[in-house]
Image (spheres, rainbow, N blue to C red):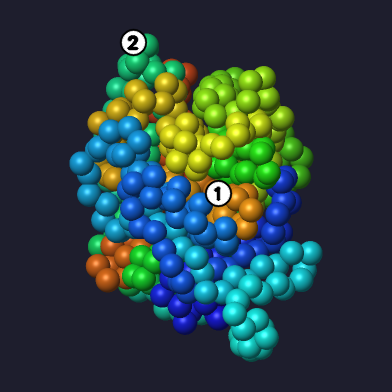
């Protein structure tokens, strides 16, 4: 499917990598080409676009849309993804129950051309010289400064991110994405292209799903490295994560934040925690995931849903407004599409969006390449351990790019 998508300057490829994270909708989706689109920071225009087009719609919401929802940061987004972009594709390919479904004006012709695309995606990536937005010493100091904010009562928990970047990088995005998924297949993966801007995403996290009148969010807080060479040790690591007071504290804070956000737009007494502290295993890490849901009030537009829930609590912290101010103060880089969301609307108004993490962002024109990693900081956080957690989360990307970043 991706080989076939190469002919399009705009496409969105979503792949659950054969995971079955409930609710499970499609194994794979590809939206290619553009019939119409909306690119704006005005959420009312998005509501109008969605209301006028009850069709398949794909796209993204950048973290930087918070400039309109909350307050501006004034930082430059060097990759160049717009704050918000949605498009009606010319072709939609869906795989469900191992069956290929084609939505287009000429499905028979598309079917033949897709079947002709075979073989492994290969390409050349030049040697990349990565830099970090923060030295280790600067990172450790910022963690201690954030712990001081927590001690003063400014916030309870904050997601703090750092950036790895390269200038004048030359990569084949298709080959890098294939390698990234070979190393770290995850259930909310995405390959998203807007002309010269590429997102290569191996996300394990769902931001928000709507099915009929039910909203569901599945934030991740809590990570531990796996030992896939020793099953007994690997199970012990899972137990360690399950019983970690620090990770449970992070997770429950985000759960409470999501419950509060959902209560703004959901019917009274319908918001509930479906699963608390669930432990899920991925190729390189075990992670703690909770599930929160609620019944949406009648006639709530997408803009109001975003105002209530975005940016997602797992990528900000609590209380949300104050920690976003601290994020702007302490993170030197713009987040851009990182910690935003990529996904789709299906006919009838249901939708599903991931959290953009474990991702490479690349501008093919400027050659600017970036990835960001973060962790949840609480008063009990150890700065050295947080540094190591960030490097662990970046490991798959470093392997995919054949980069050796200094610790």
- Which badge, 1 or 2, comes first in the chain's sequence? 2
- Of marks 1 and 2, the one in the foreground: 1
Reply above or below: 55 against 207: below
Residue 178 is situated, as x and y percent measured from the top left of the image, at 54, 69
Residue 276 is situated, as x and y percent measured from the top left of the image, at 68, 27
Q: Quadrant of residue 133?
A: top left
The one of 80 and 106 positioned closer to us in this rendering: 106
Seen as rendered, the residue at the extreme right is 97
Q: Which residue is mark 1?
A: 353
Would residue 338 appear left or right of 88 to someone viewing this image? left
Q: Quadrant of the C terminus?
A: top left
Q: Residues within 10 Å of mark 2 (few under 14, many from 20)?
A: few
User: Could one spot residue 298 in this view of the protein?
Assistant: yes
Q: Which residue is mark 2?
A: 152
Would residue 285 appear left or right of 49 to someone viewing this image? right
Q: Quadrant of the N terminus?
A: bottom right
The secondary element bearing badge 2 is classed as: helix
User: Could one spot residue 284 in this view of the protein?
Assistant: no
Residue 127 is situated, as x and y percent measured from the top left of the image, at 34, 70
Would residue 375 appear left or right of 20 to someone viewing this image? left
Mark 1–mark 2 distance (CA, rounded to whole Å):
35 Å
The one of 117 and 368 positioned closer to us in this rendering: 117
Please name the residue shown 68% across and 44% down the image: 212
Please name the residue shown 61% across and 57% down the image: 346
The secondary element bearing badge 1 is classed as: strand
Label annotation for residue 395: none
Reply above or below: 230 against 235: below
Mark 1 and mark 2 in contact? Answer it, CB < 8 Å. Answer: no
Q: Residues within 10 Å of mark 1 (few under 14, many from 20)?
A: many
Residue 265 is situated, as x and y percent measured from the top left of the image, at 55, 29
The one of 76 and 172 positioned closer to us in this rendering: 76
Q: Quadrant of residue 102?
A: bottom right
């Amino acid at each position: 499917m991706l080989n076939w998508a190469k002919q399009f300057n705009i496409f969105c490829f979503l792949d659950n990598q054969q995971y079955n994270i409930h609710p499970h909708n499609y194994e794979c989706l590809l939206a290619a080409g553009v019939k119409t689109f909306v690119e704006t920071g005005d959420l009312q225009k998005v509501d109008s676009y969605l209301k006028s087009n009850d069709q398949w719609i794909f796209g993204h919401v950048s973290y930087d849309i918070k400039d309109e929802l909350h307050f501006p940061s004034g930082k430059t987004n060097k990759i160049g993804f717009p704050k918000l972009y949605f498009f009606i594709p010319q072709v939609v390919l869906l795989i469900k129950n191992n069956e290929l479904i084609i939505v287009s004006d000429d499905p028979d012709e598309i079917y033949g051309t897709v079947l002709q695309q075979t073989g492994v995606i290969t390409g050349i990536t030049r040697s990349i010289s990565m830099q970090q937005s923060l030295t280790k010493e600067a990172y450790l100091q910022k963690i201690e400064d954030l712990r001081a904010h927590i001690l003063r009562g400014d916030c309870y928990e904050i997601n703090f991110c750092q950036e790895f970047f390269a200038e004048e990088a030359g990569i084949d995005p298709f080959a890098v994405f294939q390698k990234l998924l070979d190393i770290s297949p995850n259930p909310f993966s995405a390959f998203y292209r807007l002309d010269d801007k590429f997102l290569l995403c191996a996300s394990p996290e769902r931001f928000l799903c709507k099915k009929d009148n039910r909203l569901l969010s599945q934030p991740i807080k809590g990570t531990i490295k796996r030992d896939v060479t020793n099953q007994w040790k690997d199970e012990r690591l899972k137990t360690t994560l399950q019983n970690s007071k620090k990770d449970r504290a992070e997770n429950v804070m985000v759960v409470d934040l999501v419950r509060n956000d959902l209560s703004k737009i959901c019917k009274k007494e319908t918001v509930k925690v479906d699963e608390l502290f669930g432990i899920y295993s991925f190729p390189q890490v075990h992670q703690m995931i909770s599930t929160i849901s609620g019944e949406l009030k009648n006639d709530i537009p997408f803009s109001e849903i975003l105002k209530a829930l975005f940016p997602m609590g797992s990528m900000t912290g609590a209380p949300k407004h104050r920690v976003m101010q601290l994020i702007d103060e302490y993170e030197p880089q713009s987040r851009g599409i990182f910690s935003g969301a990529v996904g789709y609307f299906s006919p009838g108004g249901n939708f599903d969006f991931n959290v953009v993490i474990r991702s490479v962002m690349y501008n093919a024109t400027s050659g600017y390449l970036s990835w960001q990693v973060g962790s949840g900081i609480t008063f009990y956080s150890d700065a050295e351990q947080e540094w190591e957690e960030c490097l662990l989360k970046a490991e798959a990307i470093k392997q995919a790019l054949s980069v050796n970043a200094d610790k």
